[in-house]
Image: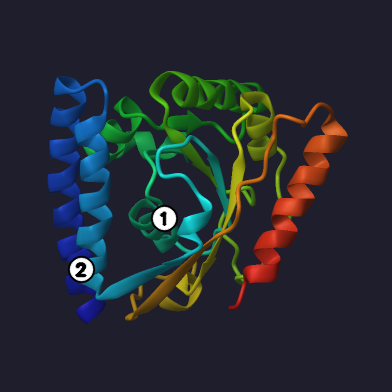
Amino acid sequence: MITWIKIFFIVIHTFICSVIGLIFIFIDRSFTLYHILAKIFPGGVLLITGIRVKTFGLENIDKKAVYVFASNHSSQLDITALQWGVPNRLSMIFKKELARIPFFGWQLALGPYVIIDRKDPQAAMKSLADARKVMDKKKISVLVFPEGTRSKTGEIQTFKRGAFYLAARSGYPIVPITINGTAKIMPKGTFKLRRGTIYLHFDKPIPTDNIKTKQDELELMEKVRNTIIANKKD
C-alpha cells in the first residue's frame, strides 16, 4: 500500500515537472533552466521514496567538462540516481517508445536528449551522431548504458559497442560509473520500492583521442566493463 502511495506522488511530481520542463524548453534554448529542473526532478523522487544517494570519486571529474558517462543498469532507479549524482550538464539516449508518453515523453523528445530506435541499426547510428552534436554544440555530457537494457540478475551483462563508438568519434573522455544498491531497492520487473541507499562510484576519465580502430574500441569497451565489474558490490 505504501509503495502505491509513493508511486501516486511520483506520478504527480513527474507531471508537474514535465509541464514546467516543456515551458523551459520553449523559453530557454540554452537548456540552462531545463538542467536546473533535471536536478529538482530526481531530488523530489528521492525525497518521496526516502532513498538516499551517496557518491564517491567526484574528485576524478571536472564538473564543467564534457564526458561520455557509461554506467551499469539494473533498475528503473538508475536514471534517477544518475540524474541526481552526476554534477555535469547531462543528456541521455532514450528509447523512442518513451517519447509517446504525454508530457513526460514530449519534454524528453524536445529537450537535449537523444531518441534511439534499438530495432533499426541505421537509425541507432544516426542517434549516436545526434548525441555527438549535442556534446559539441551544447557542451553537454551524454549518459549511456552499454548493456543496452536492465540486468535481471544485477550481474554486468555483455556490453554493446555503440557507447564506445560515440566516445571514440567524439574524442571526449569516457567515465565509468558503477551503481550499487538500486537492484535491491527496486528490482527489474517490480514496482515495489524499498528504503535504502544507492551508491555511485565515479572512476577516472579514460581518454579516447587515441582510439583509431575497431579493435581499439573493443579494448576500451572491455576496459570500462572490467572497471565497473571491479566496483560492483551487489
SS at badge 2: helix
SS at badge 1: helix
Q: Nearer the viewer, residue 231 or 10?
A: 231
* Above/below status of 51 relative to 40: below
Mark 1 → mark 2, Cα distance in angstroms: 15 Å
Q: Earlier in the sequence, mark 1 or mark 2?
A: 2
Q: Quadrant of residue 63?
A: top left
Question: Which numbered marker is on residue 82?
Answer: 1
Instruction: Where is residue 196? Give x, y as percent.
Output: 36, 80
Q: Is residue 157 visible?
A: no
Instruction: Where is residue 177? Give x, y as percent.
Output: 55, 57
> Which residue type does callout 1 highlight?
Leu
User: Image check: 223 left or right of 61?
Assistant: right
Question: Which numbered marker is on residue 47?
Answer: 2
Question: Which numbered marker is on residue 161?
Answer: none
Instruction: Where is residue 78? Give x, y as percent.
Output: 44, 60
Q: Quadrant of residue 109?
A: top left
Q: Nearer the viewer, residue 66 or 79?
A: 66
Q: How is the image coloured?
A: rainbow
Q: Residue at x 61, y 26 (%)?
A: 170
Q: Residue at x 54, y 64 (%)?
A: 74
Q: Residue at x 64, y 34 (%)?
A: 167
* Above/below status of 70 relative to 7: above
> Which residue type does callout 2 highlight?
Leu
User: Image check: 87 left or right of 167?
Assistant: left
User: Image check: 62 left or right of 27?
Assistant: right
Near mark 1 (Cα within 10 A), the count class, few <14, some 14-19 or many ≥20, is many
Locate the N terminus and report the quarter of the image it occupies: bottom left
